[in-house]
Image (cartoon, helix red, strand yellow):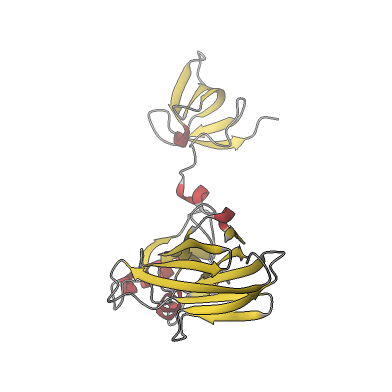
Amino acid sequence: MSGNSTDDNGQRDRMISAGGSTVWAFQAKAAAAGKVWINFDITTGPDAENAPEWNVTLYDSTGELWSNYRSKRDVEVDSPGKHPKEFRLEVIAPKGARYGDEVIVDVTATSDGGTVSETFRASAKQSVMILKTQIDQEKSVVDSLLSKAGIGEKDIFAILSPGNLRGYVFVEGMNTERLREKTRDIRKARSFVDGETSLAEIDHYLTPLSTVVGIVEGDLVELINGPFKGERARVQHIDNNKEEITVELIEAMVPIPVTVKGDSVRIIEKDK
């Protein structure tokens, strides 16, 4: 038996969200045309006694061959012998999965050519969903959702409302159905965007922007705090590492360079 995956770059260990699924592709063949017996050994964890049930299903090109809801732990299939037979193993995480819950599927294929085994593992991870809100009511929605976070199941891990994103907030949690339930009666909340996003896709909202972003040498600025508050100045130099700019006060009798933090100025006019 040899394997390759239909997603996740062929990895045998996968992280999937509660209620989500993943699929592995693998092959099995007999030395000659005949039968292949495929056996499944499924374990769940880390707390096996209280772990929710995962759905494990085997398919070939004709459809479903076996699932773990059957009483038997093996299935007999025909093999063409000359060419390997293609299979797909699908695992669906339970909607009530907790972070770190996992299923391990040991697959053993036996034929007249011998016995080979393969192990597939899937673990439950959190979901990051995008919630639509009424524009300029993002904070109100976040406050309402936070007040529900500790009620019942602790489904909500984090809520993010970027200052430069209007009409949307990000919600991180495990059970997507319960996340939808908790937002159902929040007046300023609309609905969740279909599907999920990921931390990698919203990373730019998590990384603070440099205070000198958008400022270039020659810009006309106004100092908005400090001893020169209200004075106008021209940007002479920018230190990106320190997030500082050096400006020259326009109305000073003697041009004196002044170094200030990037958030201490407001751009009045861009250099042309």
- Compared with residue 246, is residue 126 higher up or lower down, i.e. above or below? below
The residue drawn where x is 66% and y is 68% is: 85
**Figure quadrant of the C terminus:** top right
Residue 16 or 43: which is nearer the viewer? 43
Q: Nearer the viewer, residue 14 or 165?
A: 14
Which residue is at the front of the view, 224 or 41? 41
Q: Residue at x 55, y 36 (%)?
A: 213
> 225 above or below 154?
above
Determine whether, in the image, residue 142 is placed left or right of residue 254. left
Q: Is residue 10 visible?
A: yes
**Residue at image coords 38%, 28%:** 227
* Identity of the residue drawn at 41% across and 35% down: 225
Q: Note whether 77 is above or below 264 in the view shown.
A: below
Q: Can residue 133 be spotted in the picture?
A: no
Q: How many marks?
A: 0
Q: Residue furthest top?
A: 254
Q: Is residue 103 left or right of residue 255?
A: left
Residue 81 image offset from top left, x and y in percent:
68, 67
| Residue 99, x across and y down, in percent | 36, 65
Residue closest to the eye, 199 or 125:
125
Quadrant of image for the N terminus: bottom right
Quarter residue 236 falls in? top right
Question: Residue 185: x, y in percent?
Answer: 43, 82
